[in-house]
Image: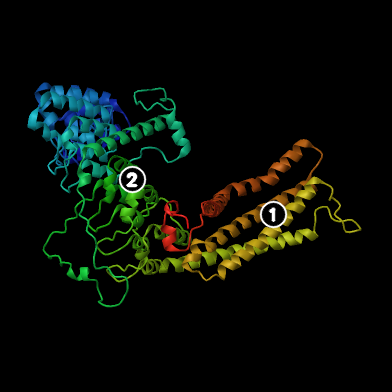
Amino acid sequence: MALTKEEDLKINADLYEALMSQKDDKVIELCKKIPKGPLHTLTIHEDTVIHMATYHKKTGLVMKLLDMVSDCDTHKLTWQNNGGNTILHETGTNNKTVKVAVELLRRAPMLLNMINKEGETALFYAARHGKTKPFRFLHDEVRRATQGPDLMTFLRRDDQFTILHIAILSRNYMIAHEIAETYKELISETDADGMTALQHLSTIKPEFQPKNFFKRMILKVIDSNIGYEGYRKFTCLKKLQKQKHACEWALKIARLLIKKDNSWENTESWTDMRGSKFHEYGKSTSTVKEEKKIPIAHEVDYHKPDTPLLLATKHDSTEIVKEILNMYPQAVEHVDKDGRTILHLAILHRRYKIIDIVEDMNYPLERLRGRLDKNFNTLLHMVGQRVDELAEDIKHPAQQLKDDHHLYQRVEKLCTTLDAMTRNSDLKTAYEVFSETNDQLRSEAKEWLCEQAKNCSLVAVLIATVAFTSVYTVPGGSDATGHPILRKKPMFQLFTLADSLSLSTALTSVILFLNVVTSEFRYKDFASSLFQKQITAFVLLIISVAMMMVAFAATLVLTISSKAKWTDETLYGVSFFPVIVFVYESMPQCNEVMKGFHRVLKSMMEKVVGVYHEIWNYKPHSTHPIIDSMDLTTRSPV
């Protein structure tokens, strides 16, 4: 007897609540009361009770529900929800329902060939979810039941998206490696957008090793074999084991695809850009720009995918770039549809590590340094352009402007002398582009620095006032001669030292902050003195506050300390605890100053070493060009 609308809604609510509450007995009891039993559609997406139980990893419950389906109703197990997924598809969403998949295929073998509305079989669906156990089981079943051309039905969707593509995008690199090894023809297959598996891998930024040094050291001693259960009781170690496993297989699939995939060869052609201008006079536009063909309006704007090397550069996949250049160093000369080389893109997207890699390749660097893109932009022009991307850390405007100016100075050393004069298709030099792009950023950086300097100056003056006043109100008071009564105690000496340091550092920081406020705020000032003064003044202010806290703690100990040991120790802890917390929280700023000091010291040492080598290798030469070129050993004596 069919259920009424109200009865159907009520039973659905009870079944859903029982499934979510893990009340398996209640689910079975409710299924016995309804005509369709466990094949009753429960959700608005037409999922049956078995669909839902399978999706939620309730293997025991699913097996009991399957036992409730009679042999004459086996064909009903092929029911598909609104997305076209069968129960066998749902087994591919987790590793705990392989037993269910075995039973389903025993009862209804036709489930193996059924596809959902995305054109995916259960095997493809398991690869989409990156689940190893159901994938391997279903793959074995497919290999046993299907051979020849029919096998491609399981390996490719209707939109040409292959199972290798989906395995890489699901980040299960071990499955992807198995697929690539078994079906080598899929390596060069492209999807509807012309993307190969290697190109997809280049866009997802796979991690070959953790960035954290200590985590890398830990991973070296951890067994990456997922079958090893020694870390089962330790959640953190199990996570590290999975991370190491993923890193190792990411490297393996990357090397395999780079070796077998020849899509890296399909680059845009590069031709020498003639017609670029080095001054603003004459024609308003360059000759080449005028000769460019105007695209036809009705033509489809198809963006051909870049090569894996350029895609990896854009998406900051530094490890992929390293592997490609190690295997095929000639790929460094690839250009994209805009005529941009790997250096153009690395500078445009601020990929500093990739710039380092190309810089270490001396000969390719010489080949790339003077290249222009199709808009006659040099490498220096790329510094003035910026691609807005979601970053992990958001820099304040002064820091960003400083980094951009440092990059400009760095790229300027790489480029030829002529590049600084070259004008792009808009007749602008690299520095003009840089100035126009960063004009708003400079205004924001100026406002930010002035606001910070004013606020910190106010704090520094208040601290200096307190420190100066403390000199005349020393703890314990003074005797008739004006000398401090407690001057011979060690804590008084600590108070005097801390108070004097607090006063001097506070006044010094005020001077530096005032110097920042009255600065001219030129571009080069952000890259050198201006920002360093701001950081140095801030660190001095931190020291000043810390020393004021030390002076306060020393005063408490001097005036309140008793003879009892435990009270003195408690007093020491309470008094100096704010100092410890303050110093700890201020370490990042101090670390930034130390890095800056290290850079300055390194630069000075390089200059000293350079001067030393010039003096050491100096050899006097004749000023006469002809005599200087003659071989003195062949000249006859006069």
Q: Is residue 506 left or right of residue 337?
A: right
Quarter in which the N terminus is drawn: top left
Vertical arrangement, residue 113 with respect to residue 446, above or below: above
**Which residue type carries mark 2?**
Ser
Q: CA distance from mark 1 to mark 2?
A: 48 Å
The residue at the point 50 percent across, 69 percent down is 521
Q: Residue furthest bottom?
A: 282
The residue closer to the viewer here, 606 or 191, is: 606
Judging from the image, the colouring scheme is rainbow
Q: In which image quadrant can residue 505 be found?
A: bottom right
Q: Earlier in the sequence, mark 1 or mark 2?
A: 2
**Which residue type carries mark 1?**
Met
Q: Residue furthest front?
A: 638
Neighbours of disc 1 within 10 Å: few (<14), some (14-19), many (20+)? many
**Which dot, 1 or 2, sits closer to the camera?**
2
Residue 169 pos. (x, y %): 26, 41
The residue at the point 23 percent across, 50 percent down is 306
Observer able to see residue 598:
yes
Question: Helix, strand or loop at disc 1?
Answer: helix
Vertical arrangement, residue 366 with respect to residue 29, above or below: below
Q: Is residue 217 left or right of residue 467?
A: left
Q: Which mark is residue 149?
A: none
The residue closer to the viewer here, 631 or 142, is: 631
State the residue position of label 2. Answer: 317
Residue 248 pos. (x, y %): 34, 33
Vertical arrangement, residue 620 with respect to residue 263, above or below: below
Question: Helix, strand or loop at disc 2?
Answer: loop
State the residue position of label 1. Answer: 548
